[in-house]
Image: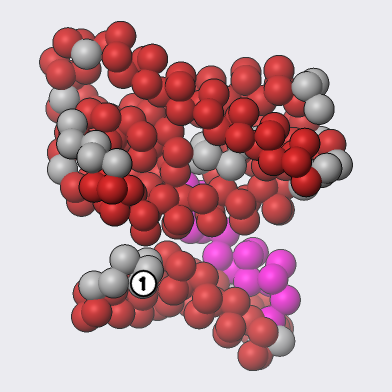
Amino acid sequence: MNDFFLNSAAAGVVLSLVSYFIGMEIKRKWKWSVLNPLLISIVLVVGFLLAFGVDYNAYNDSARYLSYLLTPATVSLAIPLYQQMELLKKNMAAIVIGILSGVLASLCSILALAVLFRLSHEDYVTLLPKSITTAIGMGVSEELGGYVVITTAVIIVTGVFGNMTAEHLCRRFRIKHAISKGIAIGSASHAIGTAKAMEMGEIEGAMSSLAIVISGLCTVAGAAVFAGLY
């Protein structure tokens, strides 16, 4: 089976898409927030690789075409933002301050956890880009000397957790304004969380898309500064 993945240009793509489709069907049937399609697909793919002894690098190479689509998929999130341009202009100051607050909260929380659990510097910088999209976070982690593979995993877990809990947390903390919801979700859980924001509404999705971009840029600069604090 490992040789099959090594010699196939599409086996990894098919496995990933089938696993995600199964996850979507499970979520559609039971509608529990914990049954996130991406989380289910990850579990299914990992289980398949372990069961059939497929090396991760072989699978990753076979699924590389999906990775190529990550950047254009992120860029396409600008479309809903463009559709809400007037709303953005009217609330520019509040939106920027909200996103910056989200970035600062993320970086400060990682610094606090690093001090509390006495993490090594490498572990610390590995976690700093946890709340930004994978395409940017991997580069930040590599530049700061972190473990890129772990950074990728942490970013995915952060996004999935945000996707699963965003709607509940907004209700719990009585966050009712659409712009506030979008900014909170996008700055905390990047593109995966934004998928949930888009389900919640057009404005939430647009603001979350904006938060991804600004949070990513601010985290690139902020992570470099925070890296020197521990």
Measuring from the top left, give residue 109's x and y in whole percent. Answer: 61, 35
Chief SS of the magenta region: helix
Q: Quadrant of residue 106?
A: top right
Q: Quick one: 144 or 82, which is closer to the camera?
A: 144
Q: State the residue at coordinates (75%, 31%).
A: 143
Vertical placement of 126 versus 213: above or below?
Answer: below
**Above or below: residue 122 compared with residue 3:** above
Q: How far across and down, in percent of the image, does residue 223 sit?
A: 66, 25
Q: Is residue 68 magenta?
A: yes
Residue interval drawn in magenta? 54-71
Where the N terminus falls, by quadrant? bottom right
Residue drawn where x is 42% and y is 65% of the image: 38
Q: Residue 53: within the magenta? A: no
> What residue lies at 65% left-to-right and 90% top-to-bottom?
52
Q: Which one is in front, 58 or 150?
A: 150
Which residue lies under the disc numbered 1? Answer: 35
Residue 92 found in image quarter: top left
